[in-house]
Image: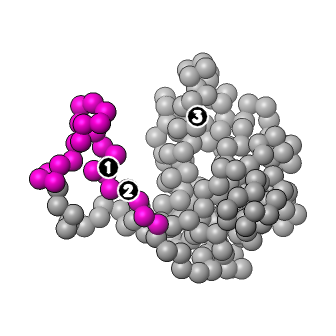
Amino acid sequence: MSKPIDAIYNRVSTRAFLKKEIPEEIIYEILKAGTQAPSSGNMQPWEFIVVSDEERKEKVVSATFSGFYSEWAPHQKWIGLAPKIIIICINTKRTKSRYAELGDKWTLIDTANAVQNMILTATEYGIGSCWVGGIKEKLIKRFFNIPSYVNPIGLLPIGYPKENVSYKYKMDPKWITHADEYNNAYYLDTKISNE
């Protein structure tokens, strides 16, 4: 049986990029794919800031947390080496206008849908990406003049991969899928074949 969308199975998190510009047509297709995501009440709460300027990219880096891939440096400097950094934001005003306080939850879910579309589209074009959530939101808001009703929730650095990244293990659905109630296995060995 063939896989429905190759990009889903080929996607890896890329943290090293070539110094090669991405054609604007591809950037547009990546952004457009984000806008095609489903959203609650079709309110489309996503906003994207594409950062190319080197000084502004350094500001983005200064607003990141330390982490494993930064080798415990104060910031994740590898992000600044991507040709483009897309700051992913949620516009709570749009969704809250229809759903009041529930909009806070749904804007995150809806925008995550958009980011997944963007990542898969980038993968299809041979562009590497990595969804980064470890940011200091208040700093990003200040550095990029983001209004009060728009909140940055993460970064998507994108670029041509510098190296091959090995695929990480993903859990098989049989370990995380339940039948009718929690802890009642949906997949039994007789239901599926992994061929």
Residue 100 position within the rendered picture, expressed as x and y whole percent measured from the top left: 60, 18
In space, the residues marked 3 and 1 are separated at their CA atoms by 29 Å
Say left or right for 70 vs 178: right
Q: Secondary structure at mark 2?
A: loop
Residue interval drawn in magenta: 168-191
Q: Secondary structure at mark 1?
A: helix
Q: Residue at x 77, y 54 (%)?
A: 64
- Magenta span has 170? yes
Above or below, 169 relative to 99: below
Which sits earlier in the primary sequence, circle 3 or circle 1? 3
Of tags 3 and 1, which is closer to the observer? 1
Q: Secondary structure at mark 3?
A: helix
Q: Residue at x 67, y 35 (%)?
A: 91
Q: Which residue is mark 3?
A: 107
Tell me the number on the disc at residue 175: 1
Q: Quadrant of the N terminus?
A: bottom left
Say left or right for 165 vs 84: left
Q: Amino acid at mark 3?
A: Thr
Tell me the number on the disc at residue 171: 2
